[in-house]
Amino acid sequence: PARGQPVLSVKGAVKRFGGLVAVNDVSFDVVAGEIVGLIGPNGAGKSTMFNLLTGTLAMTQGRVEFLGTDISGLTQQRIARLGMARTFQHVKLRPHMSLLDNVALGAHARAGAGLMAAGLRLDRREEAQLLAEARHQLARIGLAGRAHELAGSLPLGTQRILEIARALAADPVLLVLDEPAAGLRRPEKRALGDLLRKLREEGVTILIVEHDMDFVMKLVDRLVVMNFGSKLVEGSPAAVRADERVQAAYLGG
Ligand code: ADP
Ligand code: MG
């Protein structure tokens, strides 16, 4: 999609868990070429919203359009194949595999094949293609020189960055990140922020669910703030920072 065109459109999303309304009529757009942050105090409904977007949870009401297609009700795999890649709050790398193989598995996921098939039913040409793609993605994140180290031997910050490379190997239009800065040290956060800005320049659109205010404020073009399941405010980092309703929500939460 051209810069400024909507990539993701959330329309009146509602999610109920029994009597509890975790997401209450939330609407927002993510347009091509921007980094949008989804923030809010604990219990605001961010993770639930994330799960609705990525197909992990079914909506009670409302819809999500991705690149003009209604993806409400599609499986995670279908949504991924349309061009949405996600990372997980808890790193899901394969620690005993090399960096290169971890990223190659991400490239393989694009073809829609399951993990079980990886390394089992590939012919040599397919395997060579996957490894070339994986090398390209490792170079993109500055880890080409460490391709054969084990993923589990990396510090947490580097593992997060490797997870992003694995997601990128599927060549996504939209990258959805779940609290990527959680648990990272300051220099690791800086490296992560630099990488995400670089990806934005390369045309990747990014939606980031994040707890770390300092990190997110410096990074994003726009913020969507949730509180008690509803959208509280939407706007630039400066506008959100100055908003009394946001300050009150964070103090109260
Ligand atoms: P956040 O990520 O912003 O902290 P969540 O989306 O995790 O918020 O939670 C929003 C609300 O929904 C909370 O009150 C939480 O207890 C509730 N909730 C989340 N997941 C479930 C679930 N699977 N079953 C019941 N309640 C849930
Ligand atoms: Mg959460």
Image (cartoon, rainbow, N blue to C red):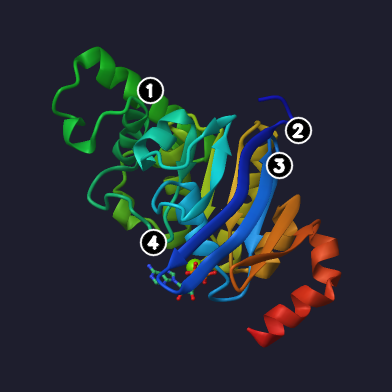
Q: Are marks 4 and 2 in contact (CB under 8 Å)?
A: no
Residue mark closest to the camera, 3 vs 2: 2
Give coordinates of residue 47: x percent, y percent.
Answer: 49, 62
From the top left corner, tell me how far across and down residue 249 is, in percent: 70, 79
- Residue appearing at x 15%, y 23% in the figure: 121
Say above or below: 220 vs 240.
above
Work out how far the residue at label 4 is from the one at label 2, CA to CA, in angstroms: 31 Å
Q: Amino acid at mark 1?
A: Ala
State if disc 3 and disc 4 touch (CB < 8 Å): no
Residue 93 image offset from top left, x and y in percent: 32, 50
Which residue, given by chain and number where applicable, does mark 1 sit on? 132
Question: Marks 1 and 3, how far apart in space?
Answer: 28 Å
Q: Is residue 21 above or below residue 175?
A: below
Residue under pointer 3:
34
> Reading the chain from its start, which is encountered first: label 2 or label 1?
2
Q: Nearer the viewer, residue 103 or 243?
A: 243
What is the quadrant of residue 64 in the picture?
top right
Q: Which of the marked residues, 3 or 2, is nearer the chain's N terminus?
A: 2
**CB of residue at label 2: within 8 Å of ligand 1?**
no
Q: Which of these two is toward me, 209 or 226?
A: 226
Residue at the limit of the structure toward the top, as seen here? 125
Q: Identify the secondary structure beneath mark 1.
A: helix
- What residue is disc 4 on? 90
Disc 2 residue type (three-letter): Gly
Q: Earlier in the sequence, mark 1 or mark 4?
A: 4
Residue type at tag 3 = Glu
Residue under pointer 2 = 4
